[in-house]
């Protein structure tokens, strides 16, 4: 099987999960206790407005027809109309999704660029002060609440040092603190994983052979050991994408960034279910696609994977 | 691995001991909260509003003059309660499903595996938010939402353990003497699968506390005036410049208790995995 056939197979395997996700997202509306239309419009709404909205949402039709119509609309990227904003959810989500992806992408890149060298250093300098410090930092990183770290960074870098703006959205200056905040926890996990997988590889026979051939130490580490140690690190990438997208919801609130996370939380407060459904669906699909990408990357870096 | 050997390995790990001590301390604080708190957690005193840390108010007061120390002490009850109940919900769903999938295999396994994959398609906080949308806000909803979100990890681990153990000789021997499937699962496979579940439980409880804090921070978890660390951080956000102690101390409390669970989980994992003994120490 070629890599293309492998990718195709993975995409086909993804389809049932995608379908199940649409069923769950569709069910959100029907699992809310009480009448969703009354909840959205409030008790004071007129019967006319109530009937109009029920018809708009297709709630007067049988459940399976509602689902197929929901699915049909999805194919046209139609996620319905927001109850509060009276605008298409797709339109509301469009720009905000890009902002969220910008934040999660930056956090992902930042966490891998910092964490892999840190984990390597900790492994190479095992049981030294550098190892203890970097692993201490890593375990603190997975224990720290991201939004609290955001507050600490704002206090230091925005309020005390005036290096970055406190909150808001704009150029790269507005992105640094949110990306560092979001990426820190992920970086901690990647650093720990890099250290432990490198330590497992470092004692293997082929590394000893490479050393015995007289190769420079760092050449052995970067060209021989790291390539194999990378496999579990790439596996972690798939998990990290979901974690980062979830984390972005909270970080957007801390830094007042206009992303889908903020939109989702305000929609939960206002019982705006088309937005809740839309954001849940879009983010779940993003995570599934991210995992697909990580799987493909895994197959590329791991020679043991047979297509 | 024999129990005394596990305890011996665990007790050799400094990190695990530190983690264990932190957790025991926090549980004691939660249990003895009414005795330890210097003031009632919800006692208002507007004349003392936003007092910095001092002799009378060790960690300062919030915008309503409530003692931060007292609220942190009582907040430990909320966080640990949720960690215990939500983890019990997750374990209660995940362990039986994982056990059935691992033991019987076939279509049952495929269904459970599919459900696990589906659960993992949703980022944890997103899934919790969607469930909170359905159930409404409040701590009870948080417990259920977080429990439902975390079941998949326990199911995956139990399934893996059952798959590895079900063909062991002692299981075949039990089958040969006519033991029922239920007895094999309950008396033989489950006790031998508990160790990795314990690791997951320790690491998972730290994650549950972080998620609860995030949901309360977003205003969806604990509702006023319940003293919750996440909600305290949310209130303190408006006073970041004027009264940084409002956010500093609750955040430290969350970090410490999560650190405790993580250190203990790591220590347990190392103690259970002899391969790691030469690496970690």
Image (spheres, rainbow, N blue to C red):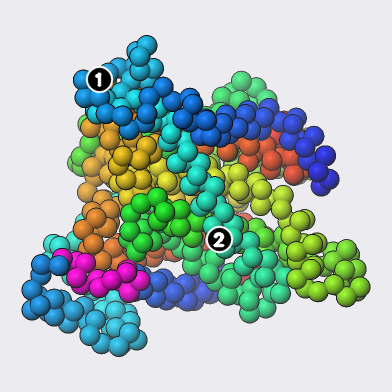
The subunit letter for the residue under badge 2 reads B
Left or right of residue B169: residue A96 = left
Near-viewer residue (B123 or B16):
B16
Quadrant into which the C terminus of chain B falls: top right
Q: What x and y, as percent, mark residue B265?
A: 63, 41
**Depth check: A74 or B134 in front?**
B134
Please report the residue visible at 43 percent of the width from the left and 47 percent of the height from the top: B211
> Would you identify the image quadrant in which residue B245 lies?
top left
Tag 2 and tag 1 share a subunit: yes
Dominant SS type (magenta): helix
Q: Residue at horizontal 42%, vertical 76%?
A: A19
Residue pictured at 13% horizontal, 76% vertical: A50
B247 w.r.t. B274: above or below: above
- The residue tagged 2 is B152
Q: Is residue A257 left or right of residue A289?
A: left
**Left or right placement of residue B56 versus residue B204 in this view:** left
Question: Residue B69 or A152: which is nearer the viewer?
Answer: B69
Q: Which residues are magenta?
A: A29-42
Tag 2: Cα neighbours inside 10 Å, few (<14), some, or many (≥20)? many
The residue closer to the viewer here, A127 or B121, is B121
Choose top left, top right, bottom left or bottom right for residue A284.
bottom left
Seen in the picture, residue B37 relative to A12 is either above or below; the reply is: above
**The disc label shown at residue B48, or none:** 1
Please say whether residue B153 is visible from this viewpoint: no
A148 lies left or right of B193: left
Note whether residue B118 is visible: yes
Question: What is the spatial separation of the Cα atoms under label 2 and label 1, in whole angstroms?
Answer: 47 Å
Is residue A223 placed above or below B151 in the rendered structure? above
Badge 2 marks a residue whose secondary structure is: helix
């Amino acid at each position: 099987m070629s890599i293309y056939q492998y990718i195709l197979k993975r995409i086909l395997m993804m389809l049932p999960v995608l379908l199940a996700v649409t069923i769950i997202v569709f069910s959100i509306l029907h699992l809310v206790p009480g009448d969703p239309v009354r909840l959205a419009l409030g008790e004071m709404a007129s019967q006319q407005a109530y009937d109009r909205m029920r018809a708009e949402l297709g709630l007067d039709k049988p459940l399976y027809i509602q689902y197929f119509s929901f699915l049909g609309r999805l194919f046209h990227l139609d996620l319905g109309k927001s109850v509060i904003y009276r605008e298409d959810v797709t339109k509301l989500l469009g720009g905000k999704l890009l902002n969220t992806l910008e934040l999660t992408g930056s956090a992902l890149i930042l966490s891998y660029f910092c964490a892999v060298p840190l984990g390597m250093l900790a492994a190479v300098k095992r049981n030294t002060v550098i190892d203890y410090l970097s692993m201490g930092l890593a375990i603190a990183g997975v224990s720290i609440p991201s939004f609290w770290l955001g507050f600490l960074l704002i206090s230091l870098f925005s309020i005390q040092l005036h290096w970055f703006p406190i909150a808001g959205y704009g150029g790269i200056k507005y992105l640094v603190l949110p990306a560092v905040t979001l990426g820190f926890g992920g970086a901690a996990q990647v650093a720990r994983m890099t250290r432990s997988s490198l330590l497992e590889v470092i004692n293997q026979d082929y590394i000893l052979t490479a050393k015995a051939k007289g190769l420079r130490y760092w050449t052995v580490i970067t060209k021989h050991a790291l390539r194999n140690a990378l496999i579990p690190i790439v596996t972690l990438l798939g998990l990290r994408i979901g974690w980062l997208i979830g984390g972005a919801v909270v970080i957007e609130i801390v830094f007042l960034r206009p992303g889908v996370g903020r939109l989702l939380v305000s929609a939960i407060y206002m019982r705006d279910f088309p937005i809740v459904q839309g954001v849940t669906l879009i983010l779940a699909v993003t995570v599934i696609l991210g995992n697909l990408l990580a799987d493909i990357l895994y197959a590329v870096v791991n020679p043991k994977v047979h297509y | 691995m024999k129990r005394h050997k596990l305890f011996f390995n665990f007790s050799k790990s400094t990190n695990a001991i530190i983690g264990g001590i932190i957790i025991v301390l926090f549980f004691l604080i939660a249990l003895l909260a009414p005795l330890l708190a210097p003031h009632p957690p919800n006692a208002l005193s507007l004349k003392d509003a936003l007092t910095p840390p001092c002799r009378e108010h060790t960690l300062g007061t919030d915008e309503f003059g409530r003692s931060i120390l007292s609220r942190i002490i009582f907040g430990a009850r909320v966080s640990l309660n949720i960690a215990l109940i939500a983890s019990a919900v997750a374990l209660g769903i995940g362990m039986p499903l994982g056990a059935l999938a691992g033991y019987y295999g076939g279509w049952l396994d495929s269904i459970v595996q599919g459900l696990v994959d589906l659960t993992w398609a949703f980022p944890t906080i997103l899934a919790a938010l969607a469930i909170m949308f359905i159930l409404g806000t409040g701590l009870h909803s948080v417990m259920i939402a977080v429990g439902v979100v975390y079941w998949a990890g326990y199911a995956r681990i139990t399934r893996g353990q059952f798959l590895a153990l079900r063909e062991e000789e002692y299981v075949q021997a039990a089958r040969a003497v006519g033991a029922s499937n239920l007895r094999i699962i309950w008396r033989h496979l489950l006790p031998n699968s508990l160790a990795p579940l314990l690791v997951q439980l320790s690491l998972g409880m730290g994650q549950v506390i972080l998620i609860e804090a995030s949901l309360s921070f977003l205003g969806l978890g604990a509702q006023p005036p319940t003293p919750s660390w996440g909600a305290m951080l949310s209130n303190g956000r408006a006073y970041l410049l004027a009264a940084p102690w409002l956010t500093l101390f609750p955040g430290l409390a969350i970090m410490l208790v999560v650190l405790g669970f993580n250190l203990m989980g790591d220590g347990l994992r190392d103690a259970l995995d002899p391969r790691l003994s030469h690496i970690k120490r």
